[in-house]
Amino acid sequence: MATDGRPVKVLRVIARLNMGGPALHVAYLSEGLRERGYDTTLVAGTLARGEDSMSFVAEELGVRVERVPELSREISPLRDLRAILRLAQLIRRERPKILHTHTAKAGAVGRIAALAAGHARPPIIVHTFHGHVLRGYFDPVRAYGFRLLERWLATKTTTLIAVSPQVRDDLVHLGVAPREKFTVIRLGIELDERISAPDGARAETRRLLGVPQDAFVVGWIGRMTGVKNTDQVLAALKLLRDRGVDAYLCMVGDGPDRERLERRAHDLGVVKRCLFLGYQEEVARFYAAFDGMILTSVNEGTPVSAIESLAAGRPVVATRVGGVPDVVDDGEDGFLVDPGSTEQLADRLEELARNPELREQMGERGRARVPSRYAVTRLVEDMDRLYKSLLAASR
């Protein structure tokens, strides 16, 4: 609450409300801060072709969403310029005390728009790195160019937020900004809404999927893109099958790689053990049906599917990249493996498949540890504390 008793105006900008953690994060955060005296306008752009929308989460929470159609994930100089001008106009109209951008594209467009807004530039500019695109996404030349851009933008930002210590340390190592410029604030998710399945959901979901009740079911939930390295998921399943494990794979999600993945499953001879289920708004019943989750990304911020899986009592086998080690406690509620090692993935999955007692123990540890760590109430408390300190300093 501002000193004059009026709500503090926040303009929160994200490139798109697509399937994934950032969309959930901004929706829950915007709604949660309302009771703390903040009036948030959530600005979002358009989805890429083939992406599935999660704007329904913001809408159900009553969060006001302002659309900027020119803002999108793809790099397009003309559209990006129009997005900057539209956002600058919005800043001049709304006159927010705080501009808070989320994800790389919105961070660049939003912070440049703040400069373009001239005398209406918000006194506080915050950017959250939900991961980063400086490794694993682009060729070396473009990655270097984006690093230079992020370094310059950091000098125009009041404070930077990283969603995990690992993401912060990676960005410091890449020279984006000094360590003291960063604050670590983890994601916050309404996990109960995402993972609570009715009694009998496990057996019923397996029956509907045509999966035997006693089979070992590996789950994967996400967007089928290059950075997720989904070919390795199929390769790990093949190794498991070659070792005599009665394993099935359920892939929940969609994306540009889906068609190729389905062909790859056929080529590997595991297509009859793979279920490509497409995008699903309700995921709780699938977590109930899984025995464990797999994550093979080459880069990650904070993987929501891993958080949800652990909270649902399902151990996770994941690559040791980005913010993943902050989510999965290696050897306690899941396993971490070296990026690119299909052998290690298969070893750990086989260990879980052949040891139901270990699965149960790991599941209980995840269920006990994760929900409070990624609670929305904790996220709102952390952000409120940060905003108040920045507002006090700006006065």
Image: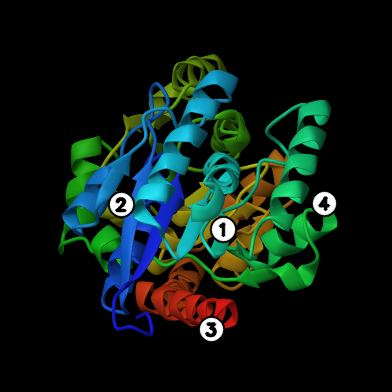
Secondary structure state at the residue bearing disc 4: loop
Q: Residue at x 60, y 29 (%)?
A: 226
Alpha carbons under labels 3 and 4: distance apart? 31 Å
Query: 237 or 296, which is in the foreground?
Result: 296
Question: Which residue occupies 21% across, 60% down?
Answer: 197
Tag in front: 1 or 2: 1
Q: Amino acid at mark 1?
A: Thr
Whichever of labels 4 and 1 marks the residue nearer the N terminus, that label is: 1
Give the CA distance from mark 2 to mark 4: 40 Å
Residue under label 2: 289
Q: Residues within 10 Å of mark 1 (few under 14, many from 20)?
A: many
Q: Nearer the viewer, residue 253 or 136?
A: 136
Query: Is 307 placed left or right of 177 in the picture?
Result: left
Image coordinates for residue 129, horizontal then vertical, percent:
60, 55
Look at mark 3 in the image and give the residue it sits on: 392
Q: Which structural element holds mark 2?
A: helix
Task: Identify which amino acid the numbered label 2 is placed on.
Answer: Ala
Please state, as top left, top right, bottom left or bottom right, where the N terminus lies in the image: bottom left
Which amino acid, mark 3?
Ala
Depth check, mark 3 against mark 1: the one in front is 3
When the figure is inspected, residue 124 is found, relative to residue 361, above or below; the finding is: above
- Circles 3, 1 touching at the beta carbon (< 8 Å): no
Give x and y (percent) for residue 363: 44, 69
**Can you tell which mark lies on residue 128?**
1
Q: CA distance from mark 1 to mark 2?
A: 34 Å
From what the image shows, is residue 128 above or below residue 394?
Answer: above
- Residue 324 vs 362, above or below: the answer is above
Amino acid type at mark 4 = Leu
- Give the residue at x 61% y 49%: 300
Of callouts 3 and 1, the N-terminal one: 1
State the residue in front, 79 or 225: 79
